[in-house]
Amino acid sequence: MISEKERKQIETESKKLLEKFARKLWEIKGLPKESMIIRDKSMRKEENGCSDKELKKRMLANAKNKNDDFIIAKEKSW
Amino acid sequence: MVVEKLKNYLKKIKKEDKKINSFLFVRNEKELLKEAKIIEDKIKKRKAGRLAGYIIGVKANINVLGLPISCASKVLEDYIGTYDATVIKKIKEEDGLIIGILNCDEFACGSSGENSAFGPTHNPVNLDLITGGSSSGAAASVAAGFCDVALGSDTGGSLRNPASHCGVVGLKPSYGTVSRYGLIDLAMSFDQIGPIGKNVYDCALILDVIKGKDEYDSISFQSPKLNLKDLDKNKKFVIGILDLEIQNNEIKKLIDDRIEKIAKKNGWKLIKIKIPHIDLAVETYYPIVYTEFFSATRKFDGRRYGKKIEEVCGTEVLRRILGGKEITKSEHHGRYYHLALRVKDFLSKEFEKVFKKVDVIVSPTVPQLPYKIGEKLSVEEIYDYDLLTIPANLFGGCAISIPCGEINGIPVGMQILGNKLDCQKVLNIAKLLEKKQILYHNNI
């Protein structure tokens, strides 16, 4: 269990690290202005989506209470 | 044959895994023996699948129906897989026998194998050392002789890094080659499932079985067919040697000497290559991982699955969540995540240029030798272990780590990195570079 003090410390360290990383990346010259998705030959064609009728049932299998589409739960009673 | 092999593995696990801690769960012996008998009968009747006789461990972040898929975390300690990941379904269809669930860094966050909520995995080569990670149990179980192959995942080197430290083979397929359906994600734009095995052939065979387009994973596609029969066929390859300073010169020398020797023997051309800003791979990778991991973990809110992640997770998982939370704040728009994506694109284009000149790029897999379990390293020092494996994930290429030799009895891996869709070429060159296998599990 991580204490609140340790949590704060991790948060501060993590922010510092990200700042340090960003500073180094900003120094790179010739970066593209935008990042983009390269759609090459490895991209799939859009099709009709998933045909498995059992998928929803499996996704909800661990829920205690559910209906056909959703997990049913009462607020603050988890 | 299969029954006998299974019995030996189970006996070995029972006797030796207390020291290694590679398995989080081993399936019921009776059930396993029953399945092994069925497979054996199929083999006798010549009706068995391509993986008949293979006994396989699975990393704890890949769903297997009915088995505890905890991601080595207290968060999902009681979670039981409700379905088979696509890779598992394919393995079962080809008569591979799944023996159990393997330890790893919590939610695959780590490169040492120390971050599991259920204790670190110990390196079978030297029990005091880390295995590397995050697929620590996968590499250790294969190296220790507890199974034939193991399935793991690779987001920034999680298959190749532990394979290198444990003296086995680890293969990260090109992004999209293998379906991620059923993989509990770390960073969805980098994650790939792949094998760790005792040799290149076993890894190639597993890849051939698990690859392919899957309607449950929109980024998956049908990659070029693998030809396993011609894996050791020599061609006039052009090999790029990555020109980059690393901390341990002995490792670099070992790799360079080996590639020079084999290149001379096989008539390959060697070219030294430089990739601008590849030394900033770590700085590019982690902001993206933090952001995607933060997003991926929002489902672990204590309602749908297990416990609330921030309340029970370990330090590294929390660091990534808090970092990701910080990045996604609107006031940081473009400062971290978007910038990292731009560098990722920049590096991808640099790799494209290089792959017009060379077939593969060879380098050490990990720039340093494994350290002692419990040794205090800074976060940045730990992240630096991923320096040479991350680029393959950034541009989506195929990469393999094969054992290349030893330094003071510790295995060192060589990484062979290929372009997107070039798995056949990578496996081909790896097979030609492969050394006779060293059986480290005899040391235990």
Image (cartoon, helix red, strand yellow):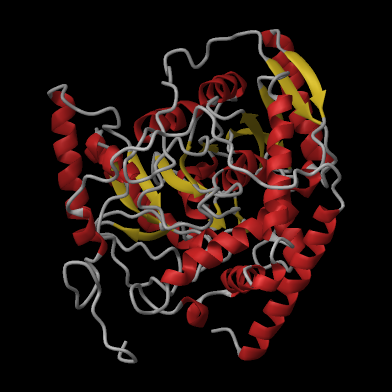
**Left or right: where B22 falls relative to B407:** left
Image quarter in which the N terminus of chain B is found: top left
**Left or right: where B318 falls relative to B412:** left
Residue at position x 58%, y 71% from top? Answer: B321
Quadrant of residue B213 in the image? top left
Above or below, B199 against B218 in this view is above
Q: Position of residue A36 (x, y in %)?
A: 62, 43
Above or below, B212 against A60 in this view is above
Residue at position x 37%, y 37% from top? Answer: A46
Above or below, B429 against A67 in this view is above
Q: Position of residue A38 (x, y in %)?
A: 59, 36
- Is residue B337 visible in the rendered image? The answer is yes
Q: How many marks?
A: 0
Residue at position x 65%, y 34% from top? Answer: B415
Q: Position of residue B156 (x, y in %)?
A: 61, 49
Q: Position of residue B355 (x, y in %)?
A: 68, 24
B193 or B397, nearer to the observer: B397
- Is residue B410 visible in the rendered image? The answer is no
**Left or right: where B398 falls relative to B368:** left
Residue at position x 44%, y 56% from top? Answer: B16
Above or below, B139 against B400 in this view is below
